[in-house]
Amino acid sequence: MKIAVSGKGGVGKTTLCAYLAQVYKNRGMRVIVVDADPDANLAQALGFENADEIVPIAEMKELIEERTGAKPGSFGGFFRMNPKVDDLPDRLSLEKNGIRLLVMGTVKTGGSGCVCPESVLLKNLIQHLFLERKDVVIMDMEAGLEHLGRATAFAVDLMLVVVEPGQRSIETAKSIYKLAQDIGIKKVAVAGCKLRSDEEAEIIKKNLPDLAFLGYLPFDHRIIEADLKGKPPFELAPDLISIVEKMVDKIESL
């Protein structure tokens, strides 16, 4: 199962990714979670200590030069477009409680979608994860789909768009759905987060009628408390795992 999770910033993507990883791990799956959001905080949500000290792959200058043949930040020169990446998931991933994590980082030069050594290495690594790994891969990404290309799109089992109550979040979901269709992702679904009632869920379903609605995580002060304490949300709110289990059941039946 390969799941790309997207949505407007702050809607709860990272929280849902952490719960999804826990559910799949509890079902006996090998799980790799990929943090491809520029505002990387998935390590904290999964309970990794010293999460702020993790060096993203995009900032591993020696590795990037070794694999691509060019220094990070360089443009216009020659470098390998298909660098070796198959050993990197096992070499670079961190593991805690049976869940492995890769922090991608952000390409900070050249703008979004630049053809530079950093972006080439990241895209090849993501393509390897989605096309060749047998693990469950859950990728926490920003609203744009820069990390995914047409070569990877057919291997994405599900684009999961996370939505909170509000028109801006819903409009972002519509944009993501269109982008996903444009690059060939076949299955797109929506999940709510921070919802206070079934009525809010109905508003989301009404505004996104073309997307399967998997359910929602309710607004819960324990999740806020977990964030403040730097703890995984499923530690302080373990009962919400049952909600995500039902989401996973729906994912399997799509």
Image (cartoon, rainbow, N blue to C red):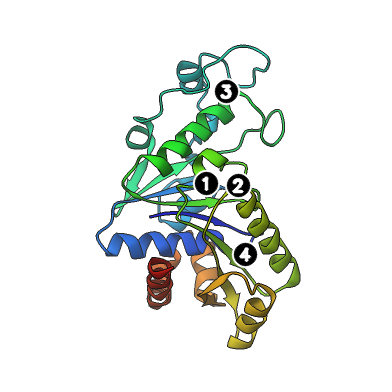
Marker disc for residue 11: 4
Residue type at mark 1: give it: Ala
- Which label's residue is closer to the chain start, 2 or 4? 4
- Which label's residue is closer to the chain start, 1 or 4? 4
Vertical placement of residue 145 versus 213, above or below: above
Residue type at mark 3: give it: Pro
Q: Residue at x 32, y 36 (%)?
A: 90
3D distance between C-alphas at marks 3 and 4: 31 Å
3D distance between C-alphas at marks 1 and 2: 6 Å
Which is more toward the observer, 19 or 46? 19
Disc 3 is placed on an element classified as helix
Quarter of the picture containing the N terminus is bottom left
Callout in the foreground (2, 4): 2
Q: Position of residue 125 (x, y in %)?
A: 45, 34
Marker disc for residue 183: 2
Vertical placement of residue 214 versus 138, above or below: below
- Which label's residue is closer to the chain start, 3 or 1? 3
- Marks 2 & 3, CB-CB < 8 Å contact: no
